[in-house]
Amino acid sequence: MKKMLVHGQKDMLQIAIVSDNSLYEYYMEKTENAGQLVGSIFKARVANVLPGMQAAFVDIGLPKNAFLYIDDVLHPHLERQPKEKPQINSLLQPGQELLVQVMKEPLGGKGARVTTHFSLPGRFLVYMPIADYIGVSKKVSTEAERSRMRAVGEKIRLPGEGVIMRTAAEGESLASLQQDVQFLREHWQEIHHRGETASAPTLLHRDADLVHRLVRDLLTTEIDQIWIDDGSVFRKTKAMMKRLAPAMLPRLQLFEPLIGGASLFQQDHIHEQLQEAFQRRYRLKSGGDLVWDQTEALTVIDVNTGRFVGTSDLEDTVFRTNLEAAEQIARLLRLRDIGGIIIVDFIDMDEEQHREQVMQLLERLVRTDRTKCQVVGWTRLGLLEMTRKKVREQKILPSRETSGNRD
């Protein structure tokens, strides 16, 4: 049983995705932020060009200038790029105005990372106005369906446009996909038209708020139930689902707690699971533990047997602990939204097949991560190296009051 729990308050919205009573995903957004910065489109002004770095800093109206690398200025389709990469100062000059889209939030003391490779996500596809190629989600189950979706993508795009068919497009009709791309195409035309007359720096488009992204990005056929404890959020979600996912409306329920009864998050112990997930030392059910240490760009996870002594076979004890650790690492990386380089110091295993099984399990589990995650492999020192895309600041754990109680 996979459930989505949505807890609404006056100043905050929280979403928890629970599978078999275990918390796998958690999202939080303050209502005054009205959407994340990633995906926002600005009319920017080039502040300065750095030929030695093949990059430029552009003013998008934030306290720190955004960073624009040359690869994000060239055409998004590799086949349309020049064979030899030009100098950045032949493409951009200080004072020049251009449209850019945020691909990474400002992190620490760094400004946002921006691109000119624009993309607008819809329910079934991602529309890229100048990409000139078709992509299909790697999570689509069969090659036949991938071929069908690619053929449909060719039919619905105009010359020069690009689309990426999302997993939600699996089995969808040509009409549904055509409607999705047409809506996004018209929206892009509005953004582009405003950009022609606006003065830089200015915000032209901000990605949807968390309620909209809930339906657009998080709602899949794997979700069996959607529970919402706030009336206004429930009505807004229901209206959005009628337009974007009408077949899933029977799964939507309004949670109304009994007087003195448990709240929506309390029923599934969401707060307790969050507190446990964000601790430096995370206890495994077997008695082993994970110890997390973080810097801005690197996370190190140390796996220990702890109180788990197994039976009589040390190799089996170590192997079982490492398998359990791999499962929890994949889950906790998503909950903590950790990005950058990740090094896992699993307990040393003597048998090569055990090392391979641990790595294969981790590879399989991270494929379900909505954020791009790659298992690189074992280093010469016996450490497992991974990377996970970092697009925003790490999540901040809310207090008990904001996690469990209603206003």
Image (cartoon, helix red, strand yellow):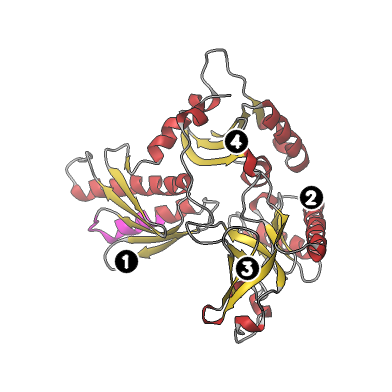
Residue under the image location 61 percent in, 44 percent down:
218
Give the vertical position of 238 relative to 333 (above or below).
above
User: Which comes before the other along the chain, label 2 or label 4?
Assistant: 4
Image coords of residue 115 (percent x, y):
63, 67
Residue behind mark 4: 13
Residue 137 pos. (x, y %): 62, 58
Q: Tag 4: residue type?
A: Leu
Of the two numbered discs 1 and 3 in the rendering, the one whose residue sits closer to the viewer? 3
**252 is higher (above) or lower (below) than 301:** above
Which residue has dot 2 on it?
A: 176
In the foreground, 240 or 206: 206
Q: Nearer the viewer, residue 290 or 164?
A: 290
C-alpha distance separating marks 4 and 1:
41 Å
Of the numbered discs 2 and 1, the one sitting upstream in the chain is 2
Mark drawn on residue 58: 3
Q: Is residue 95 magenta?
A: no
Q: Secondary structure at mark 2?
A: helix
Pick the front one: 86 or 129: 86
Mark nearer the viewer, 4 or 3: 3
- Residue beneath label 1, please? 379
Residue 241 position (above or below residue 150): above
User: Residue 285: where, in percent of width, then height?
Assistant: 32, 36
Alpha carbon separation for disc pair 2 and 4 = 30 Å
Amino acid type indicated by mark 2: Ser
Specify the segment rendered in magenta: 348-360
Q: CA distance from mark 2 to mark 3?
A: 38 Å
